[in-house]
Image (cartoon, grey):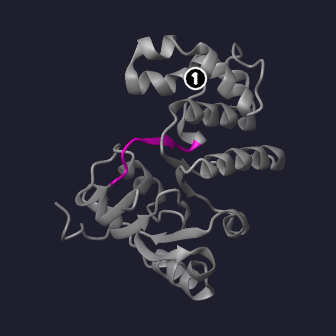
Amino acid sequence: MPVLAVHNLTVTHGRRPAVHHASFRLAPGGKMAVVGPNGAGKSPLLRAIAGLHPPAEGRIEGAGRVALLPQAAALDRGFPLSCRDAVLFGLWAEAGAFRSLAAPERAEEALAAVGLSGFARRPVGSLSAGQFQRVLFARLLLQDAPVILLDEPFNALDARTVEDLLGVLRRWHGEGRSILAVLHDLDLVRREFPETLLLAREVIACGPTAQVLSAENRLRARMMAEAWAEHAAPCARAA
Protein backbone atom coordinates (compact mmCIF):
# COMPACT_ATOMS: atom_id res chain seq x y z
CA MET A 1 0.00 0.00 0.00
CA PRO A 2 1.31 3.50 -0.77
CA VAL A 3 2.10 5.72 2.18
CA LEU A 4 0.30 8.53 0.36
CA ALA A 5 -2.37 8.33 -2.35
CA VAL A 6 -4.14 11.40 -3.72
CA HIS A 7 -7.31 10.72 -5.67
CA ASN A 8 -9.08 13.29 -7.89
CA LEU A 9 -8.11 16.10 -5.50
CA THR A 10 -9.51 19.58 -6.07
CA VAL A 11 -8.49 22.41 -3.74
CA THR A 12 -10.26 25.71 -4.26
CA HIS A 13 -10.14 29.35 -3.23
CA GLY A 14 -13.61 30.82 -3.56
CA ARG A 15 -14.58 27.78 -5.66
CA ARG A 16 -11.83 28.60 -8.18
CA PRO A 17 -9.42 25.68 -8.34
CA ALA A 18 -5.87 26.02 -7.04
CA VAL A 19 -5.43 22.26 -7.61
CA HIS A 20 -7.71 20.63 -10.14
CA HIS A 21 -8.58 16.90 -10.04
CA ALA A 22 -5.04 15.78 -9.17
CA SER A 23 -4.13 12.13 -8.60
CA PHE A 24 -0.74 10.63 -7.72
CA ARG A 25 0.95 8.15 -5.36
CA LEU A 26 4.03 8.35 -3.17
CA ALA A 27 5.42 4.97 -2.19
CA PRO A 28 6.64 4.21 1.36
CA GLY A 29 10.05 5.77 1.81
CA GLY A 30 9.60 7.77 -1.41
CA LYS A 31 11.40 11.03 -2.15
CA MET A 32 9.42 13.18 -4.56
CA ALA A 33 9.85 16.77 -5.73
CA VAL A 34 6.86 18.94 -6.67
CA VAL A 35 7.64 21.44 -9.42
CA GLY A 36 5.65 23.76 -11.65
CA PRO A 37 5.12 27.40 -12.61
CA ASN A 38 4.12 30.08 -10.13
CA GLY A 39 0.46 29.72 -9.18
CA ALA A 40 0.46 26.02 -10.08
CA GLY A 41 -1.08 24.98 -6.75
CA LYS A 42 2.03 23.49 -5.15
CA SER A 43 1.57 25.08 -1.71
CA PRO A 44 -2.20 24.41 -1.57
CA LEU A 45 -1.47 20.77 -2.42
CA LEU A 46 0.88 20.42 0.55
CA ARG A 47 -1.53 22.22 2.86
CA ALA A 48 -4.34 19.88 1.82
CA ILE A 49 -2.19 16.81 2.50
CA ALA A 50 -1.29 18.26 5.91
CA GLY A 51 -4.98 18.69 6.73
CA LEU A 52 -4.84 22.51 6.75
CA HIS A 53 -6.98 23.10 3.65
CA PRO A 54 -10.08 20.91 3.25
CA PRO A 55 -10.44 19.57 -0.30
CA ALA A 56 -13.43 20.62 -2.34
CA GLU A 57 -13.41 17.20 -3.97
CA GLY A 58 -11.44 13.98 -3.91
CA ARG A 59 -9.63 12.26 -1.08
CA ILE A 60 -6.19 11.74 0.44
CA GLU A 61 -5.36 8.27 1.74
CA GLY A 62 -2.56 6.85 3.82
CA ALA A 63 -0.87 10.13 4.83
CA GLY A 64 -1.11 9.38 8.52
CA ARG A 65 0.96 11.69 10.71
CA VAL A 66 2.75 14.36 8.68
CA ALA A 67 5.10 17.22 9.46
CA LEU A 68 4.89 20.35 7.29
CA LEU A 69 7.59 22.96 6.81
CA PRO A 70 5.82 25.99 5.28
CA GLN A 71 7.49 28.69 3.25
CA ALA A 72 9.73 30.79 5.50
CA ALA A 73 8.18 33.96 4.05
CA ALA A 74 4.82 32.94 5.52
CA LEU A 75 6.19 32.83 9.09
CA ASP A 76 6.36 35.75 11.52
CA ARG A 77 9.80 36.02 13.11
CA GLY A 78 8.91 39.13 15.10
CA PHE A 79 7.34 37.20 17.98
CA PRO A 80 9.78 37.04 20.97
CA LEU A 81 10.57 33.33 20.86
CA SER A 82 13.82 31.48 21.56
CA CYS A 83 15.20 28.88 19.16
CA ARG A 84 14.50 26.15 21.71
CA ASP A 85 10.88 27.26 22.13
CA ALA A 86 10.43 27.49 18.37
CA VAL A 87 11.54 23.86 18.07
CA LEU A 88 9.37 22.76 20.99
CA PHE A 89 6.36 24.42 19.39
CA GLY A 90 6.27 21.51 16.96
CA LEU A 91 5.34 19.26 19.89
CA TRP A 92 3.02 21.83 21.47
CA ALA A 93 0.79 21.92 18.40
CA GLU A 94 0.50 18.13 18.39
CA ALA A 95 0.34 17.13 22.07
CA GLY A 96 0.06 20.23 24.24
CA ALA A 97 2.24 22.00 26.76
CA PHE A 98 3.11 19.05 29.00
CA ARG A 99 4.89 17.08 26.29
CA SER A 100 6.67 20.20 25.04
CA LEU A 101 7.89 21.25 28.49
CA ALA A 102 9.23 17.74 29.08
CA ALA A 103 11.49 17.80 26.00
CA PRO A 104 13.96 20.73 26.26
CA GLU A 105 16.98 18.42 25.96
CA ARG A 106 15.53 16.84 22.83
CA ALA A 107 15.07 20.30 21.34
CA GLU A 108 18.71 21.17 22.00
CA GLU A 109 19.81 17.87 20.46
CA ALA A 110 17.73 18.65 17.37
CA LEU A 111 19.32 22.11 17.12
CA ALA A 112 22.78 20.54 17.37
CA ALA A 113 21.86 18.07 14.60
CA VAL A 114 21.24 20.97 12.18
CA GLY A 115 24.38 22.85 13.13
CA LEU A 116 23.00 25.19 15.79
CA SER A 117 24.70 24.02 18.98
CA GLY A 118 24.52 26.74 21.61
CA PHE A 119 21.61 28.54 19.92
CA ALA A 120 18.85 27.34 22.29
CA ARG A 121 18.38 30.71 24.01
CA ARG A 122 18.92 32.89 20.96
CA PRO A 123 15.76 34.77 19.83
CA VAL A 124 14.61 33.71 16.39
CA GLY A 125 14.38 37.36 15.37
CA SER A 126 18.19 37.62 15.59
CA LEU A 127 18.84 34.78 13.15
CA SER A 128 19.84 34.93 9.51
CA ALA A 129 17.54 33.34 6.94
CA GLY A 130 19.71 30.23 6.83
CA GLN A 131 19.87 29.89 10.62
CA PHE A 132 16.11 30.27 10.89
CA GLN A 133 15.56 27.56 8.30
CA ARG A 134 17.83 25.29 10.33
CA VAL A 135 15.58 25.93 13.35
CA LEU A 136 12.56 24.85 11.30
CA PHE A 137 14.36 21.67 10.24
CA ALA A 138 15.16 21.00 13.91
CA ARG A 139 11.46 21.32 14.68
CA LEU A 140 10.71 18.70 12.04
CA LEU A 141 13.33 16.42 13.60
CA LEU A 142 11.57 16.67 16.93
CA GLN A 143 8.16 15.92 15.40
CA ASP A 144 9.55 12.59 14.14
CA ALA A 145 6.80 12.12 11.54
CA PRO A 146 6.89 9.36 8.89
CA VAL A 147 5.76 11.78 6.15
CA ILE A 148 7.57 15.11 5.69
CA LEU A 149 6.22 17.94 3.54
CA LEU A 150 8.59 20.77 2.59
CA ASP A 151 7.46 23.97 0.87
CA GLU A 152 10.43 25.64 -0.86
CA PRO A 153 12.86 24.62 1.91
CA PHE A 154 15.99 26.02 0.21
CA ASN A 155 14.66 29.33 -1.11
CA ALA A 156 17.14 32.25 -0.70
CA LEU A 157 19.63 30.17 1.31
CA ASP A 158 23.41 30.13 0.91
CA ALA A 159 25.07 27.10 -0.67
CA ARG A 160 26.53 25.77 2.60
CA THR A 161 23.15 25.84 4.36
CA VAL A 162 21.48 24.13 1.40
CA GLU A 163 24.06 21.35 1.42
CA ASP A 164 23.78 20.88 5.20
CA LEU A 165 19.98 20.67 5.03
CA LEU A 166 20.15 18.30 2.08
CA GLY A 167 22.20 16.08 4.36
CA VAL A 168 19.30 16.10 6.83
CA LEU A 169 16.93 15.08 4.01
CA ARG A 170 19.24 12.25 3.01
CA ARG A 171 19.27 11.02 6.59
CA TRP A 172 15.47 11.13 6.79
CA HIS A 173 15.22 9.24 3.52
CA GLY A 174 17.68 6.66 4.79
CA GLU A 175 15.45 6.16 7.84
CA GLY A 176 12.56 5.23 5.54
CA ARG A 177 10.59 8.46 5.86
CA SER A 178 8.58 9.71 2.89
CA ILE A 179 9.46 13.19 1.60
CA LEU A 180 7.42 15.47 -0.65
CA ALA A 181 9.17 18.78 -1.38
CA VAL A 182 8.17 21.83 -3.43
CA LEU A 183 11.28 23.02 -5.29
CA HIS A 184 12.26 25.43 -8.06
CA ASP A 185 15.87 24.41 -8.72
CA LEU A 186 15.53 21.73 -11.40
CA ASP A 187 19.22 20.85 -11.28
CA LEU A 188 18.84 20.08 -7.57
CA VAL A 189 15.69 18.07 -8.31
CA ARG A 190 17.51 15.99 -10.91
CA ARG A 191 20.40 15.38 -8.54
CA GLU A 192 18.54 14.61 -5.31
CA PHE A 193 14.99 13.44 -6.07
CA PRO A 194 14.33 10.18 -7.94
CA GLU A 195 10.65 11.06 -8.49
CA THR A 196 8.94 14.28 -9.50
CA LEU A 197 5.38 15.59 -9.73
CA LEU A 198 4.98 18.30 -12.37
CA LEU A 199 1.94 20.38 -11.46
CA ALA A 200 0.15 23.17 -13.35
CA ARG A 201 -3.00 23.11 -11.23
CA GLU A 202 -3.52 19.75 -12.93
CA VAL A 203 -0.95 16.95 -12.87
CA ILE A 204 1.12 17.19 -16.04
CA ALA A 205 3.27 14.16 -15.22
CA CYS A 206 4.39 12.13 -12.21
CA GLY A 207 7.10 9.48 -12.05
CA PRO A 208 10.85 9.15 -12.62
CA THR A 209 12.39 12.61 -12.60
CA ALA A 210 14.21 12.36 -15.94
CA GLN A 211 10.97 11.46 -17.72
CA VAL A 212 8.77 13.99 -15.92
CA LEU A 213 11.15 16.90 -16.60
CA SER A 214 11.24 16.34 -20.34
CA ALA A 215 11.19 19.46 -22.53
CA GLU A 216 7.74 18.47 -23.81
CA ASN A 217 6.24 18.25 -20.31
CA ARG A 218 7.82 21.52 -19.16
CA LEU A 219 6.52 23.28 -22.27
CA ARG A 220 3.04 21.93 -21.64
CA ALA A 221 3.12 23.21 -18.05
CA ARG A 222 4.28 26.64 -19.17
CA MET A 223 1.57 26.86 -21.83
CA MET A 224 -1.10 25.92 -19.32
CA ALA A 225 0.17 28.61 -16.94
CA GLU A 226 0.07 31.23 -19.68
CA ALA A 227 -3.56 30.27 -20.40
CA TRP A 228 -4.77 30.77 -16.83
CA ALA A 229 -7.44 33.46 -16.54
CA GLU A 230 -7.56 35.52 -13.36
CA HIS A 231 -11.35 35.63 -13.36
CA ALA A 232 -12.16 32.23 -14.79
CA ALA A 233 -15.46 30.61 -13.93
CA PRO A 234 -15.60 28.48 -10.79
CA CYS A 235 -14.83 24.80 -11.09
CA ALA A 236 -18.09 23.21 -12.16
CA ARG A 237 -17.32 19.96 -10.37
CA ALA A 238 -16.25 21.53 -7.05
CA ALA A 239 -18.66 21.24 -4.13
Residue 65 drawn in magenta: yes
Q: Is residue 72 left or right of residue 54?
A: right
Crowdedness near tag 1: few (<14), some (14–19) or many (≥20) residues, C-alpha within 10 Å: many
**Rendered location of residue 17, percent (x, y):** 32, 64
| Image coordinates for residue 33, horizontal then vertical, percent | 57, 62
- Residue at image coords 34%, 63%: 6
Q: Is residue 155 visible?
A: no
Q: Horizontally, is 57 left or right of 128 in the view? A: left
Percent position (x, y) of residue 62? 34, 53
Q: Amino acid at mark 1?
A: Ala
The residue positioned farthest toward the bottom in the image shown = 216
Residue pictured at 83% horizontal, 46% vertical: 160
Q: Is residue 116 magenta?
A: no
Task: From the viewer's perspective, tell me whether residue 97 is left or right of residue 214.
Answer: left
Check the image and name the residue furthest to the right: 160
| Residue 61 visible somewhere in the drawing | yes
Q: Main secondary structure of the magenta part?
A: loop
Chain part drawn in magenta: 62-71
x%, y% of residue 59? 26, 59
Residue identified by numbered label 1: 86
